[in-house]
Each structure stands twice: as structure tokens, then as C-alpha cells.
Amino acid sequence: MSPHYELRVEGHLDEHWSAWFGGLTLTREDDGTTTLRGAVTDQAELHGLLAKIRDLGAPLLAVSTSAAPDRGE
């Protein structure tokens, strides 16, 4: 199973960016940030996601691992 990550960026990203971020789930938080969540296959994919955030110009606030969602959800 691939590890799951949460990447938090400043600002609200529209849902259409989800495809560009490899299908990660985007959640617009009440504090004006966006959290991207999902499985990341390996370190190369993680670095690719970080590069996309850089290219987008969205300040990266946090990167953390998260528990994988239950398969029933």
C-alpha cells in the first residue's frame, strides 16, 4: 500500500487542479488554505508534487503523512 500524504498550501485551489496533482483530493479549509490528500507511490512522485506546487506559486505550508482512509469509505 502506498503511503498517504497531506500537503497544505496557502490559498484556495479550485477542484480542477486535482487532476494536475495526480488525483489527490483537494479540501479548501476555513482558514484560507487548501489541503491535498492522497496516496503517493514513492519519493519521486512526492518530489514531483512538490515541484508542481512550486510551479503553481502556491506557498507550501506543511507536508505530513496521514493515515490511509478505510477501504469502506
Image (cartoon, rainbow, N blue to C red):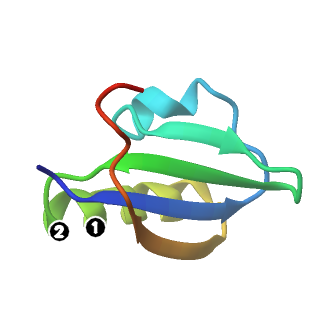
Residue type at numbered disc 2: Gln
Q: Give the secondary structure at mark 1.
A: helix
Q: Is residue 58 left or right of residue 70?
A: right
Position in image of residue 32 (x %, y %): 86, 55
For the residue pair 64 and 17, the one nearer the viewer reads as 64
In the figure, residue 67 lies in which quadrant? bottom left
Position in image of residue 33 (x %, y %): 77, 57
Q: Give the secondary structure at mark 2.
A: helix
Instruction: Look at 15% across and 64% down and name the residue there.
Output: 44
Instruction: Look at 51% across and 65% down and name the residue there.
Output: 54
Q: Is residue 19 left or right of residue 2?
A: right
**Tag 1 residue:** 47
Q: Which mark is residue 9?
A: none
Circles 2 and 1, Cβ within 8 Å, touching? The answer is yes
Q: Residues within 10 Å of mark 1 (few under 14, many from 20)?
A: few
Image: 34 above or below 47: above
**Tag 2 residue:** 43
Which of pointers 2 and 1 indicates the residue nearer the eye? Answer: 2
Q: Is residue 47 left or right of residue 8?
A: left
Image: 3 above or below 28: below
Image: 5 above or below 34: below
Image: 34 above or below 54: above
Position in image of residue 64 (x %, y %): 45, 73
Quadrant (top left/top right/bottom left/bottom right) for the C terminus: top left
Instruction: Look at 16% across and 52% down and name the residue there.
Output: 2
Residue type at numbered disc 1: His
Q: Residues within 10 Å of mark 2 (few under 14, many from 20)?
A: few
Instruction: Look at 33% across and 50% down and name the residue there.
Output: 68
Q: Is residue 21 left or right of residue 53?
A: left
Distance between the alpha carbons at the discs numbered 2 and 1 = 6 Å
In the figure, residue 5 lies in which quadrant? bottom left
